[in-house]
Image (tube, grey):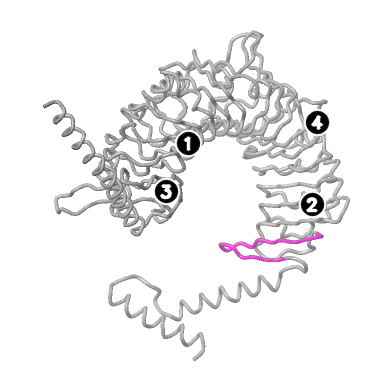
Amino acid sequence: MTWMSQFWDECRFMHQKRHFEGQEMFESCEEIISLSLFVLVYMVYANSDCPVACECDVDDGTLNLSCGGKIPDTLPLNTRVVNITDINYEYLVQSHFNHARWANVTKLYLRGGSVKVVSNYTFWNVRNLTHLQISFPALKSIDINALSHLTKLQTLDLSGNLDLSFGVIVDALETTEFTNKLDELKLHSFAGLMTPGELDEKFFLLLQRFSLKRLDISHANFRKVNLRALSQLGSSLEELRMVDVDLTSFMFYFNGPYTQQMFPNLQLFDMSFARMQWLVLSLNNRDAVGIYDCFFPPFQATNLIMNNIISNTVTQKSVTYKTRNCNRNVRGRLEMKNNMIRYLNITVDPNMPMYSDIDISNNGLEYLSLNLTSHVTILKWISLTQNNLGVMEKYAEFVDLFADNLELAYIDLSFNKLSRLPKDFFLNKRKLKTIILSNNLLHSQLFLIEHLSELEYFDISNNKILFMESNSLRTFESMSFEMESNHSHVRQLSVNLTGNIFKCDCDTKSFIQWILATRVTLVDRESYICEMQKNVIQIYYKTLRDIEQLCERTKIILMATLIPLFSAGILLITGIILICT
């Protein structure tokens, strides 16, 4: 039986079934087969029309074309996306895009190869482009009218042009009038400079005309950013990426009134891996070292990312933030990972909502100001893993570090060299769902968690815990199961105790028995280990029997020791009585 006859029989069966059930369907199977044949013929035709050395892929009725080495002379029908790599020409000219079907292309990606010049009117026949990428390591020139007719362009990616100067880009963009406004400009991995070491006002004034929403100037070779010039982008800017920039100094000075709403719609500011000698933000030329006034005052960023920043201020001493006199309502994410910040001292306006998610992990942090945590009342998620807050635990204020964060649902304090947590450390955190305390130096769990009715995951793995107190075990049991009206049990809590070398002896027998018998979800229960008579062994039922035998032997030895002593004591007392009488 052929695939067509199988399809025919299946179609008739489904048609009758759905008709009986009152569901709508094609009038007949003939319509379905006709449509299938049309799609099949269309796909065969599209592939037969695919240029040599290219691959054609039909996606949602449009054709995506990928080629290598050269630009095709012809295009298949309905081509919308063209991706060409390793172009072996030195010049891109209009004749490379002469075919009439280039007018249908909306996305064009040109990457790699030996192109040095993009000539005037190169894209004259591709004037409906909305996305254009031009990325050639050897590119030196984009002629002044090369882009002038691309009025529908929304995304322009000029990344990876290692020899192209900002001046060339400015000249090319100045002649262009974008009908729908340019949404995104990518210039990452870009070595060219408009003026030596600085992005100046002319460049940003040009971008202001385009109502730019997203700007990526990451991995670039400039050393200074003129903030006054950058501010020309105004209210349209939503994303600013300055990842891995080499800034000799990142100085933002203001002469005159401070503008609160410089970037009122900024959703993301990412300056991770920035290399700086110092970080300075100040008002009215007031000298300062640190980050002052509103977490980067010009950037009203919903998500602020400052990972892997290297600077003298950050690596050697401390970072101080003052956020008074700020008027904003930020409810996004703050990331300051992989720096070397020992002290983070922050003054926060308690009336100003800030970040709901904070990640300050892997900084070697020894001190975190209570002013950050206590006044950021909307805080729901915080990661402080891979720091050194064990230094701060010695001080009384440590117990109040999260005292006012009533909305907190997730906290990660792993890898902090913590040896103890205060009893009331998690007091009032009734919305906590996840607590991670792994890879510390904790010897016991004496802090209270029984009031955390929403707790779902408790991780105290890889610590120095020898056994868990009976109160803790009862807490785990009560939090892991809830009795419903039908007397069934609902599992709630998962506990991770892996990596601790427990103690296996008579004193901890009940704890070992609990590990083996409890219905609480213990993560990787089969990997739990303990030390018994200087041997580290895996915990399973034989271990419990060995402990029982050890306890019996201990009792026998104890009795064997005590009976002679008891007998000797009686004889001694008897002798003393006889002598006295």
Distance between the Cα atoms at labels 4 and 1?
48 Å
Q: CA distance from mark 2 to mark 3?
A: 66 Å
Residue 387 located left or right of residue 10: right
| Magenta range | 55-70
Which mark is first along the chain, 1 or 4?
4
Q: What kind of element bears circle 3?
A: loop
Is the Cβ of the residue at disc 2 closer than 8 Å to that at disc 1? no
Residue 414 vs 340, above or below: the answer is below
**Mark 3 residue crowding within 10 angstroms, few (<14) / some (14–19) / many (20+):** few
Instruction: Tell whether label 1 touches label 4 (CB within 8 Å).
Output: no
Disc 4 packing (10 Å; few <14; some 14–19; many ≥20): many
Looking at numbered disc 2 in the image, what kind of residue is underneath it? Gly
| Label drawn at residue 533 | 3
Which residue matches tag 1? 440
- Which mark is first along the chain, 1 or 2? 2
Q: Quadrant of residue 63?
A: bottom right
At which x and y percent is residue 412?
Answer: 45, 36
Q: Amino acid at mark 3?
A: Gln
Give above or below for 366 relative to 455.
Answer: above
The residue where tag 2 is placed is 112
**CA gap, disc 2 to disc 1?**
49 Å
Q: Residue at x 22, y 47 (%)?
A: 482
CA gap between label 3 and label 4 equals 70 Å
Name the main secondary structure of what is drawn in magenta: strand
